Amino acid sequence: MAPYLFLCLFLFFPHLYASFSSSESHSCSSLIQFKDSFSITKDASWYFDYITGLKSYPKTNSWKEGTDCCSWDGVTCDHLNAHVIALDLSCSWLYGTFPSNTTLFLLPHLQKLNLAYNHFNSSKIPSEFGRFTSLFYLNLSNTWFSEVPSQVSHLSKLVSLDLSSRIDYSGQVTIDKHALEGLVHNLTEVRHLFLDGINMTSVNAHVFMNLSSSLRSLSLAFCDLQGKFPKNIFDLQNLNLLNLRYNQLSGQIPRSLGNLLQLTHLHLSGNQLSGQIPLSILNLTQLEYLEISENSLEGSIPDEAYICHLAILVNSPNF
Ligand SMILES: *[C@@H]1O[C@H](CO)[C@@H](O)[C@H](O)[C@H]1NC(C)=O
Ligand SMILES: *[C@@H]1O[C@H](CO)[C@@H](O)[C@H](O)[C@H]1NC(C)=O
Ligand SMILES: *[C@@H]1O[C@H](CO)[C@@H](O)[C@H](O)[C@H]1NC(C)=O
Ligand SMILES: *[C@@H]1O[C@H](CO)[C@@H](O)[C@H](O)[C@H]1NC(C)=O
Ligand SMILES: *[C@@H]1O[C@H](CO)[C@@H](O)[C@H](O)[C@H]1NC(C)=O
Ligand SMILES: *[C@@H]1O[C@H](CO)[C@@H](O)[C@H](O)[C@H]1NC(C)=O
Ligand SMILES: *[C@@H]1O[C@H](CO)[C@@H](O)[C@H](O)[C@H]1NC(C)=O
């Protein structure tokens, strides 16, 4: 009788089966193995403490083998089947080369992964990251990695991608031209794209002409981008933030800037932009922060800009 009862339970309440299964403990040991491939050292996250004034701590210190990892600091599971769906080990003092065979890749259900502000010692981001096809959030900012693999463009569900690097490390992270093309082409859902500090010396800025119209934030500071920026950017009407600081972009700021009605932050300092600031800037009624210094711009910002939006901060020696 008893075995029958169990069978019925599993048939009608399949989630019970999951909680008895070993998939959960497999995920837990994968996480432990992942953690064990790094040393834990405060220096790995010092930059976070430095810029935020907060105190980082190793989240993995509370991880105890033999306990349910769904309750561990930084780990989130799906209630139904106990799959690990989110891992936030940002600012957790992880130091060392990122192993390409890490057990992290045995967690295929991950939807959110944040490893920002750890120190991966100039290792390449393994191409196996391309297997995380369920990811909608990936954050590897300020992790001292050296190369973005083209497989990142397989993560077509990404809504947020942050691969930005701190300024004094900028130029050290490389991305292949085709990888960048693939990324722009495939990430059709992306809303927040932060690629600051990635060396794009060998990339034509035109690669960015077909970005997703869902985009809210585009940040490409210190990328060493050359030439004219594609006009299509000014058709991305949902943009709140456009940061192109410190590249080598030339040409004029197009009138179509006035299409970006949602824009709150515009950073164009440190380029070779020329000509007049288009009057259409008056259209940007949401603008809170404007940075255009260190360019070859002529004329001045229309007075109305000051009157209409008092919050504008004009950080420019030209005016
Ligand atoms: C960090 O990289 C250096 C230079 O490649 C290497 O000698 C060192 O062993 C690496 N350290 C770790 C913990 O991976
Ligand atoms: C990964 O590879 C290294 C050597 O290449 C090996 O020592 C280690 O056990 C492997 N790790 C896993 C989880 O397979
Ligand atoms: C990435 O993580 C860091 C640290 O938690 C955070 O400051 C940053 O805003 C994150 N980036 C995105 C795009 O969420
Ligand atoms: C960017 O990469 C190029 C090679 O593609 C290299 O010559 C240049 O020095 C790098 N820039 C920085 C700032 O490291
Ligand atoms: C786009 O993503 C799919 C899988 O999600 C992949 O098969 C394809 O190669 C990707 N295309 C590019 C250009 O990366
Ligand atoms: C952008 O899209 C257009 C139309 O689909 C296409 O002709 C063009 O080659 C694309 N440009 C890039 C740089 O991908
Ligand atoms: C200003 O915004 C309006 C929509 O409110 C738009 O129709 C117009 O083209 C914009 N003007 C310029 C110069 O961009």
Image (tube, rainbow, N blue to C red):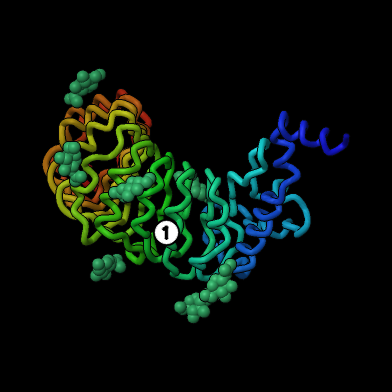
Q: Which residue is drawn at 35% across and 42% down?
A: 187
Residue 3 lies, in percent from the top left, at: 83, 38
Mark 1, secondary structure of its residue: loop
The 10 Å Cα crowd at callout 1, few under 14, some 14 to 19, many 20 or more, is some
Figure check: 293 above or below 232: below
Q: In which quarter of the image is the N terminus?
A: top right
Q: In which quarter of the image is the C terminus?
A: top left
Q: Residue at x 43, y 39 (%)?
A: 159
Q: What residue type is labelled 1?
A: Arg
In the picture provided, is 309 more to the left or to the right than 50?
left
Figure quadrant of residue 43: bottom right
Residue 302 lies, in percent from the top left, at: 20, 30
Q: Which residue is drawn at 44% across and 69% down?
A: 123
Figure check: 43 above or below 279: below
Q: Residue at x 75, y 44 (%)?
A: 20
Res 15 seen here:
yes
- Total labels: the figure holds 1
Residue 111 lies, in percent from the top left, at: 52, 43
Figure quadrant of residue 217: top left
Figure check: 13 above or below 59: above
Q: Name the residue under label 1.
A: 166
Pick the front one: 108 or 251? 108
Quadrant of ligand 4 in image: bottom left
Figure quadrant of residue 9: top right
Pick the front one: 70 or 193? 70
